[in-house]
Amino acid sequence: MKELESAILESNPEKLNNLLNKVEIFKLSDSDIKELIELSKNKGIAKLETTLLLKFKTELDSYSDKEKEISIIALIEELSEDIYCSGWNDGIEQELWNWGNGISEPNEIFQKRVVKSDAKLAVEYGKEIGLWAVWNDDESEPRAISIRDWNKKLNK
């Protein structure tokens, strides 16, 4: 438990993933899992929170629809910031979707900033919760949409 807390406090997704892949992790109690997810939420690192939620799906089931919407938006915003130093770079939702699904590769300029596992995390999480996030021009902010609506938008 202490190692997991340390990975979260260090904001180290790679270390967290390595620890989560250990067999002993499944010995965590429900309260331990809730505590780790809450710690990652408080730390404000969406990659950590979604990694934990995908590993412990029973906790994901306890999220309200609104919490799921907030979390997918936060994840895509965080990845946009990591890649482009921009809270929501124009087209990031399409790029992450394509990179995470293996449809395309990041261009040469961004290959060092884009971690494919992050794009895959976003796509896996989005599919798990049935949501994706897009920029809403009318409100000048992102909004969550269903995966079904996202797929319709892609196929126009």
Image (spheres, rainbow, N blue to C red):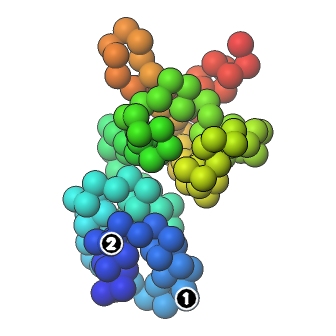
Query: Which residue corresponds to the image point at 38% horizontal and 53% vertical from the top-left?
Result: 46
Say above or below: 42 vs 124.
below
Nearest the eye: 117 or 111: 111
Residue extending farthest to the top is 138
Answer few, some or many: residues within 10 Å of disc 2's Cα (few below 14, many 20 plus, some between 14 and 19).
few
Say above or below: 47 vs 96.
below
Q: Earlier in the sequence, mark 2 or mark 1?
A: 2
Query: Which residue corresponds to the image point at 50% horizontal and 24% vertical from the top-left?
Result: 90
Q: Residue 59 at x, y = what percent?
A: 39, 62
Can I make out residue 128 in this image? no
Q: Amino acid at mark 1?
A: Val
Q: Amino acid at mark 2?
A: Glu
Residue extending farthest to the left is 42
Query: Which residue corresponds to the image point at 47% horizontal and 76% vertical from the top-left?
Result: 15
Answer few, some or many: residues within 10 Å of disc 1's Cα (few below 14, many 20 plus, some between 14 and 19).
few
Question: 12 left or right of 99?
Answer: left
Say above or below: 30 vs 106.
below
- Residue at mark 1: 23
Nearest the eye: 52 or 13: 13
Give the numbered dot on residue 10: 2
Give the quadrant of the C terminus.
top right
